[in-house]
C-alpha cells in the first residue's frame, strides 16, 4: 500500500504537491500586475517602468511556476509548468531586448508584456483549481451519528432501566418495544417480530424474526415487543463500522487523462521545431550576417508557445459538459468518473433503489372474478388509506390508478408487520399477511405462494383474494445491461436482499454474476479485492448501505433520493428514473474527449495564424499595441464556441 502511494505521489505533477493557498494569493497579486501593466501600456508610460512591473510579477508571482517546472524536469516530466515557464522566460527575454537594446532583436511584436502577465494569471488560476479539487477529496459528513441509536432498555432482574446504547455490553438482556430502534447487535431471546433492516441490507420489506434470529443495531422493530441478548456492543456493530469507515475515508477522485499536462509536451516540441525552422529560414533568406539579431524570431515563437486559449481547452468543455448533463438530469461532480467508466473492467450494481425504484408496487391482483377483484381492491384501499408504509403506499397508488374509491373509516388498528383491521359502516375489513388472516379465523382455501410480498384481503370474515407486490425495475435496465456487456464490461449485481429476489432480478435483466445477502462491509471487500487484481471498478448504488462500496470504487454513481447523505463525495448523481442515464455518461465521455482534442488543434492553428501575421505582415501594422493580445483573445473565443457544442449532447 505504501509503495502504491509513493508511486502515485511520484507520478503526479509538481503543481499538486503544493497547497492551494500557495497559488491563491499569488493569483490575486498577478491580476493586479496584469491590470497595471495593461493600463501603463495604454497610457504609454515609461517602458522601463512597465518592464519593472513585469519583472516583479515574475519574481513574486511566477516563482512557484518556475519551481514546479524545475521539479518536473528533474523527474523528466514535461508538464504545463514546463511549457508555461519556457514561454514566460522567452517572452521576458524578447521584451527585454525591445526595451533596452539599442538594436532590438528581430520580431514584429513591440513586446509580449501583456501576454506574459496574462499567462502567469492563467497558470496560477489553473493550478489553484487543480489543487482545490485535490483538497476536496477529504470526506466531510455532518450528523452521521444520528444513524446510531441513543438508548436501550436494560433488564436488571425484573426491572427495566433506560441506559445509553454505548453502555450495553455483551451478554446483557434488553427489551425492544415495537417502533423502537435496536440499540446493539444481538440475538432474539424471546418473541417474534418483523424488523426493517433497510439501513443495513437495503431491503425495503420488513424481515420476519424469531428466537435465535440475528438483529442489527440501528434497525427498526416494526412488529411486537421482543427481548434481545446482546452479542456485540454498539461500537462494534455493523452500522458503527459503516460510519467509522466514512469518517476515516477519503474520496477517490480521478483526474481525466485529457488534462493540460498531456498536451503540453507536444506544444513545446512543436513550438521549438517551428521556431527553429523560422530562425533558419530568416537567417538564410534575410539578414544572415546577424545571427543574434534573428534569434528574436525564435524567442517570439517560444514566447507564444503557450497561448492563452490553451488554458481553456479543458476548462471550457468541462463547464459546458456539466451544463449539458444537467439538462439530462445528471449532476457530474468529478469528470474523471466519465473516463473511469469508459476504462472500467466491471460495473457493480446494487439492486434496491438502483436497478429497481426502491418502492413497492402492486404486480398482480388475484381474485375469483371481476366483481370479487373490485371488492378486494376496495377492501385493501379502505383498510390502508390512513396507514404510512411501503405496503400501504403501493395499495393507495394502485387504487388511484384504477379509480377505486375507499370508504370512510370509523376506526382502524395497525399491527406492525402483520396487517390492518379497519371498520367502515357495518363492515370490517382485514388486510395483511395470510398467516395473520388465518389467525383471525379467516378460511383461506389455498395459501398464496411465491417470492413476492403478499397482501390478503377479507370482508366481514369472508376471504376475497390477494395481491402480489414487487419492486419495479427501472426503465431500460435489460437494454443497458446488454450494452455494457457488448462493450466488454463485466456486470455484477450485489445486494443485501434475499436470494430469490436477487436471482429473479438478475435473470430478468440478463446478469449472470450476482451476490445476495451481502452486508455493507462485504460489498467494500469485494471491490477492494477487485482493485487488488489491478482492475478498475465502478459502483452504481443507492442508500446508506452502499456508502463504503462507493468510497472503495474507482468511480461512484448514485440515483438521487431523499437519502442524500452521500451527495458530498460521489462522482455522479443521477436525478432521473431511467437507467439510460448510464449510457448517456459513455456518450458524454466520448464527446468530451473529442472536444478537448479539437480544442487543442484549434488552439495551435489560431496561434500559428497569429505568429504568421507577426512574421509576414509589414511591421507598422503588427506593432499596434494590442495586436498580439487581440489575436490571443480570438483564439480563446474560438475555443469557447467549439466547447459550447457540448450543451446539446444527444
Image (cartoon, rainbow, N blue to C red):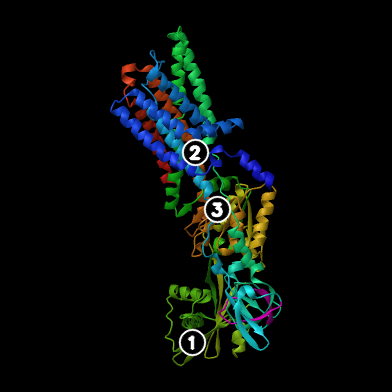
Identify residue for label 1. 412
**Image quadrant assignment for residue 627:** top left
What mark, if any, has residue 138 been given in the picture? 3
Please tell me which of labels 3 and 2 falls first in the chain. Answer: 3
Question: From which residue to which does the magenta span run?
Answer: 171-189
Is residue 637 toward the left or the right of residue 205 in the image? left
Label 1 crowd (10 A; few <14 / some 14-19 / many >=20): many
Q: Quadrant of residue 125?
A: top left
Q: What element carries label 2?
A: helix
| Mark 3 or mark 2, whichever is nearer to me | 3
Residue 126 image position (x, y, % from top left):
47, 39
Cα–Cα span, label 1 and label 3:
50 Å
Query: What label does residue 576 carry, if any?
Result: none
In the rendered image, the vertical position of residue 162 relative to residue 574, given as above or below: below
Q: Is residue 349 visible?
A: no
- Where 389 sits versus 43, above or below? below
Amino acid at each position: 500500500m505504501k509503495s502504491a502511494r509513493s508511486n502515485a505521489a511520484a507520478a503526479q505533477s509538481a503543481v499538486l504537491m503544493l497547497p492551494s493557498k500557495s497559488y491563491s494569493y499569488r493569483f490575486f497579486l498577478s491580476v493586479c500586475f496584469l491590470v497595471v501593466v495593461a493600463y501603463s501600456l495604454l497610457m504609454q508610460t515609461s517602458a522601463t517602468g512597465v518592464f519593472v512591473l513585469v519583472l516583479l510579477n515574475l519574481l513574486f508571482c511566477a516563482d512557484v511556476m518556475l519551481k514546479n517546472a524545475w521539479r518536473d524536469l528533474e523527474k523528466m516530466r514535461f508538464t504545463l509548468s514546463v511549457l508555461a515557464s519556457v514561454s514566460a522566460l522567452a517572452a521576458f527575454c524578447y521584451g527585454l531586448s525591445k526595451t533596452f537594446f539599442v538594436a532590438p532583436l528581430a520580431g514584429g511584436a513591440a513586446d509580449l508584456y501583456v501576454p506574459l502577465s496574462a499567462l502567469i494569471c492563467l497558470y496560477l488560476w489553473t493550478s489553484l483549481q487543480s489543487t482545490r479539487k485535490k483538497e476536496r477529496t477529504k470526506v466531510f459528513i455532518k450528523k452521521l451519528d444520528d444513524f446510531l441509536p441513543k438508548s436501550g432498555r436494560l433488564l436488571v432482574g425484573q426491572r427495566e432501566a433506560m441506559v445509553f446504547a454505548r453502555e450495553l455490553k455483551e451478554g446483557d438482556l434488553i427489551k425492544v418495544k415495537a417502533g423502537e430502534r435496536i440499540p446493539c447487535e444481538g440475538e432474539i431471546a424471546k418473541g417474534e417480530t418483523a424488523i426493517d433492516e433497510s439501513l443495513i441490507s437495503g431491503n425495503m420489506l420488513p424481515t420476519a424474526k424469531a428466537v435465535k434470529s440475528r438483529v442489527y443495531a440501528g434497525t427498526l422493530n416494526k412488529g411486537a415487543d421482543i427481548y434481545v441478548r446482546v452479542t456485540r456492543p454498539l461500537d462494534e456493530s455493523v452500522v458503527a463500522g459503516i460510519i467509522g469507515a466514512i469518517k476515516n475515508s477519503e474520496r477517490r477522485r480521478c483526474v481525466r487523462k485529457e488534462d493540460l499536462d498531456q498536451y503540453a509536451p507536444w506544444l513545446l516540441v512543436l513550438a521549438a521545431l517551428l521556431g527553429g525552422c523560422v530562425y533558419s529560414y530568416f537567417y538564410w533568406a534575410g539578414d544572415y550576417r546577424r545571427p543574434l539579431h534573428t534569434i528574436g524570431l525564435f524567442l517570439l515563437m517560444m514566447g507564444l508557445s503557450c497561448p492563452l486559449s490553451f488554458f481553456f481547452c479543458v476548462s471550457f468543455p468541462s463547464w459546458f459538459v456539466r451544463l449539458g448533463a444537467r439538462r439530462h438530469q445528471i449532476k457530474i461532480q468529478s469528470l474523471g468518473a466519465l473516463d473511469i467508466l469508459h476504462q472500467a473492467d466491471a460495473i457493480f450494481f446494487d439492486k434496491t433503489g438502483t436497478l429497481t425504484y426502491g418502492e413497492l408496487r402492486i404486480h398482480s391482483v388475484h381474485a375469483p372474478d371481476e366483481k370479487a377483484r373490485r371488492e378486494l381492491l376496495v377492501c385493501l384501499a379502505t383498510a390502508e388509506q390512513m396507514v404510512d408504509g411501503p405496503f400501504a403506499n403501493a395499495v393507495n397508488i394502485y387504487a388511484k390508478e384504477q379509480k377505486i374509491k375507499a370508504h370512510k373509516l370509523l376506526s382502524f388498528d395497525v399491527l406492525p408487520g402483520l396487517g390492518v383491521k379497519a371498520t367502515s359502516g357495518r363492515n370490517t375489513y382485514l388486510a395483511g399477511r395470510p398467516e395473520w388472516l388465518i389467525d383471525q379465523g379467516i378460511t383461506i382455501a389455498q395459501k398464496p405462494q411465491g417470492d413476492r410480498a403478499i397482501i390478503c384481503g377479507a370482508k366481514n370474515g369472508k376471504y376475497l383474494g390477494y395481491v402480489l407486490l414487487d419492486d419495479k425495475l427501472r426503465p431500460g435496465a435489460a437494454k443497458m445491461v446488454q450494452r455494457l456487456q457488448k462493450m466488454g464490461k463485466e456486470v455484477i449485481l450485489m445486494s443485501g436482499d434475499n436470494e430469490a429476489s436477487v436471482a429473479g432480478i438478475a435473470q430478468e435483466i440478463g446478469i449472470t454474476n450476482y451476490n445476495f445477502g451481502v452486508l455493507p462491509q462485504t460489498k467494500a471487500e469485494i471491490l477492494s479485492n477487485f482493485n487488488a487484481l489491478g482492475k478498475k471498478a465502478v459502483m452504481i448504488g443507492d442508500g446508506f448501505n452502499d456508502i463504503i462500496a462507493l468510497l472503495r470504487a474507482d468511480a461512484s454513481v448514485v440515483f438521487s433520493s431523499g437519502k442524500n447523505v452521500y451527495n458530498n463525495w460521489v462522482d455522479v448523481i443521477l436525478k432521473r428514473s431511467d437507467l439510460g442515464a448510464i449510457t448517456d455518461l459513455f456518450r458524454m465521455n466520448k464527446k468530451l474527449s473529442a472536444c478537448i482534442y479539437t480544442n487543442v488543434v484549434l488552439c495551435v492553428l489560431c496561434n500559428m495564424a497569429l505568429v504568421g501575421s507577426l512574421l509576414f505582415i509589414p511591421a507598422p501594422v503588427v506593432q499596434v499595441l494590442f495586436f498580439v493580445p487581440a489575436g490571443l483573445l480570438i483564439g480563446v473565443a474560438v475555443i469557447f464556441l467549439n466547447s459550447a457544442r457540448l450543451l446539446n449532447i444527444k
